[in-house]
Amino acid sequence: MELRHLRYFCVVAEELNLTNAAERLHMSQPPLSRQIKQLEKEVGAELFERSSRGLRLTPTGQFFRQHALQILEKVDVTLEATRRMARSKRSLFGIGFVPSVFYGQLPLLVRDLRQKDNVELTLAELTTVQQIQALKAGRIDMGFGRLRIDDPDVEQEVLFDEPLIAALPCGHPLEGTTPSLEELARYPLILFPAKPRPSMADMVLGLFRRKALKVEVVQEANELQTALGLVASEVGITLVPEQVKRVQRDGISYVYLADPSLTSPVICSRRRGEPPSAVMQEADAILEVLVENRRSGRYP
């Protein structure tokens, strides 16, 4: 199957008329009809219902069209980005991140890299597991997450361990205290992200399990901001990394925990054994300064 087959199919699916589709594609109708039949043979299913009244997409055809459009859009975006890079003589550098690391030092890394004349920077919000997959596929060059994942093709570096804090609705009985896990376990818990797993949700559950504490998970949210919104709505409480307290949101109070050893790592992932590019060396140099600022308590 070639990209042109997908493009032919999408035009026919839009027109639902072979004559009109052939005109748009600047080709005659018989070869277009043969290309569509060849595509259906390769897919192993009929994509169109053919009748005297014309063409209509089958349910399989509707599914195929949806995904074909996504593929073609991705190809077009990639081609345009490649052409833009060629014109600007810049190197493409991709960074993946989980949302909870974007409230501290990471935006400064992004800002500094964007100011470099030799870098075309792309950002992707990805779970740690998705970052590993994206690194191996070459879609990103550096990832920032919180899970340790053993993969022979990826190396991980713990930049620092960040204290966990509790996000409580304002007026909560634990507001203004430094609660223990035992105290927190008495209240409904909100977890994030709900999927994909494993994720920070599993890390938080593991903290309670290691102390043989049972918790009531009242809600799971896919997004950090959704979890905080649920806390503000008094649905429950949640545990978040310290830097999230920079999110000033009405109805939420943040408190430190009694046990300072309860932390979440900030982990940088890179492809293993790959000689660092000039851009990677610049990113590492910026990151080294930012991490030192974090560890020493200095924030620019």
Image (spheres, rainbow, N blue to C red):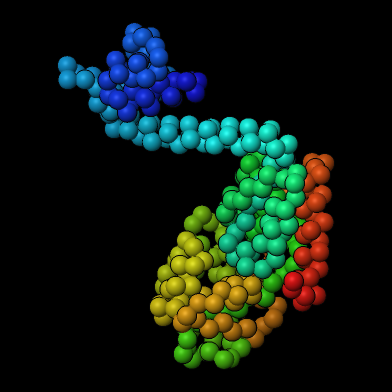
Q: Position of residue 4 (x, y in %)?
A: 47, 20
The answer to whether any part of residue 47 appears in the image is no
The answer to whether any part of residue 258 appears in the image is yes
- The residue sitting at 55% across, 70% down in the picture is 205
Q: Quadrant of residue 59?
A: top left
Q: Position of residue 100 (x, y in %)?
A: 60, 65
Q: Is residue 134 above or below residue 47?
A: below
Q: Position of residue 268 (x, y in %)?
A: 72, 56
Q: Quadrant of residue 19?
A: top left
Q: Nearer the viewer, residue 28 or 196?
A: 28
Q: Nearer the viewer, residue 39 or 116?
A: 116
Q: Position of residue 137 (x, y in %)?
A: 64, 39
- The residue sitting at 78% across, 46% down in the picture is 279
Seen as rendered, the residue at the extreme left is 52
The quadrant in which the C terminus is found is bottom right
- The residue sitting at 28% across, 28% down in the picture is 57
Q: Nearer the viewer, residue 286 or 225?
A: 286
Q: Is residue 151 above or below residue 205?
A: above
Q: Is residue 94 above or below residue 108?
A: above
- The residue sitting at 63% across, 47% down in the picture is 122
Count of numbered marks? 0
Q: Nearer the viewer, residue 16 or 62?
A: 16
Q: Is residue 6 left or right of residue 91?
A: left
